[in-house]
Image (cartoon, coloured by chain):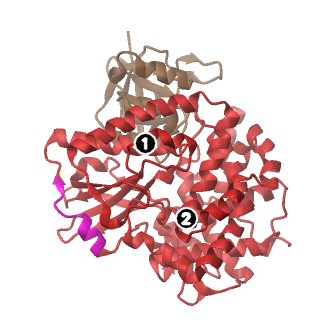
Amino acid sequence: MGQLDGYRKVGTGQNVFEAEPVEGPLKWLETPQDVIDFVNGDDVEETIVLSRGGTTTFMAPALSSGALGLITLQGGPQSHLGIVSREFGIPCVMSVAFTEGVELPTGETVPADGSIVRLESTTTPNADVYVKEG
Amino acid sequence: MGEAEDAAAAFQPFLEQYLAEVPGGAAGDRKIRERITTPFMDITAEDVRLDSLTDEQIDGWQQYAAWNLWELIANRSTEGESGLIPRQEYETCAFVQHWSVYPRIMRTITEAIGVDGVIELGRTAHREVGTKLNVTRNWATPMVAMLGRGIVAKLGLEEPGARREDLEEVIKFARRLQFGTWGEGCGFVSGRGFVSPALDADVLARLAVDLDPLADPDVRKAFRRFNGATELFGFLLHYDNRAAMCDTGPYPQEDGGFIIVRDHILHERAYEWGACAEGLPYAVTEILSFKPGTDPLEVTINDISTTFTKPADYLKHLDAVAVYARDEQETPMEGLRRLGPDEQLAIAKQCSTTMLSLYQTIADKDRDQKIKDGVQVYAYEMIMPIAQRAGVWDDVKPQVDELSELTLQAWPTLCGGGAAEVLPPVFLLGEGFPLLSKVSS
């Protein structure tokens, strides 16, 4: 888990399963309506989504619609979301503690929406999350 | 570090080992056994029929159950918040309801069908797939009631030594179901090497004929989609719990490979929102065949019938499958229907479409209604399949439906922020299982 040229490491989390790295714009999902709007929009399959909890049901439409990758701020690989992301084969890194980004009203730090994020999900138990520079 | 980080760091050893002393897995099973003087989690043909239990037997079972629960939960203890369903709130309220009514219902069931009848219900896992009367219930039915006991003690609503006879009933009932499934020996999957090969060989052999190979990448992709869509829909239909899924196995095969048998329940009519699943079979069952390979999988199944592997992406190693539908809950095993690729595709599509509409339906409900729905699901799921088969569900359902005085007392605290505080000590620190030797009645 070293450095990548052109990217900045912004966090590490628990990786659900070993998968090829994925890279795409990030979208923070706070509410069920955010999730519904997201799956009704464009670019679902090119987008990495980020949620607070590690529960399956909140992210269910994103899983079903084939989001490119999942990041959570809470939860572990044996949580419901971990189990189901594995079934769909969607890379999922959980309980990521971000070191930089924007601060949410609830106090958590996350990369800004639209940042190009890379899940280096090739390793378990942990995997790094990068933001593309520039 | 801030206060929250300090607290998290202090708690970390308790996530890594039970009471920061006993590990998980097979090593933990061995170590916890060294601490239990009366290993009542182990069952014999004689003691499964006991009418009354000693304090030592009850405490021995509880000591093992406390470690077992930690083992199961620790890795997902920080599952965290759901933006859709207030899961911790409904879960904790339901536990109290379980403790309030399950012991009485267990007595009713035993009176109706006898001890042998309860053992026979536990045998269902040998002969049937696509049923909720499975290994998960062996574990969950007693465990949820025990957790309710722990929560009401934690909240000071009941003395932990109170209702000893109900505690005894729960353990007797659990052991009879477990004995029906496994016979003599440990009643918990964690004490059986974390494998759960419940099906009889002749039943598996009938299901595992003419398996469909997955060599074609498109066929593999379509099956993966079917598996994911049906599992996800089952989760949502059951308000984010595993009541809809059950894996058994691994079943070793002559060629060195193995089979996992997986159920996903898709159409539960007990719930008002279950009508959305009209047209879907009651359950689908997947026969998942893995060939021996150069990169062998290490497979474990836990007490709530979930498969974990190393490496984790086990579906990459899947070699062939067969998929069946149990169209109605009452469909006999002989009536199971093989599903071809076209029907699998249609079911996956319906699950995905219906999941989106159900998601919107749930999102539109207010928080209180979501908690009530969740309590109903949890309160039904761990006893309904057993009571239905025993022929007493219609009689006992009103007891499950009507929230007990104890549940109503606990509700404001648990739904007002208390659930998140109560769950960690109850789930992870053994406080869900007050030992009789340490409490006064």
Say left or right for B324 vs B241: left
Counting residues from the start of the chain, the first of labels 2 and 1 encountered is 1
Residue of label 1: B278
Instruction: Name the one closer to the observer, B307 or B70.
Output: B307
Residue type highlighted by circle 2? Gln
Give the secondary structure at mark 2: helix
A37 vs A73, nearest the viewer: A37
Where disc 1 sits, the SS reads loop
Q: Residue furthest top?
A: A134
> Which color has been applied to chain B in this rendered view?
red
Q: Can the viewer see residue B284 in this picture?
A: yes
Q: In which quarter of the image is residue B31?
A: bottom right
How many residues crowd around disc 1 within 10 Å: few (fewer than 14), some, or many (20 or more)?
some
Q: Quadrant of residue A25?
A: top left
- Label disc, if present, on residue B388 of the rendered structure: 2
Q: Quadrant of residue B328?
A: bottom left
Q: x, y (%) of residue B123?
A: 45, 75
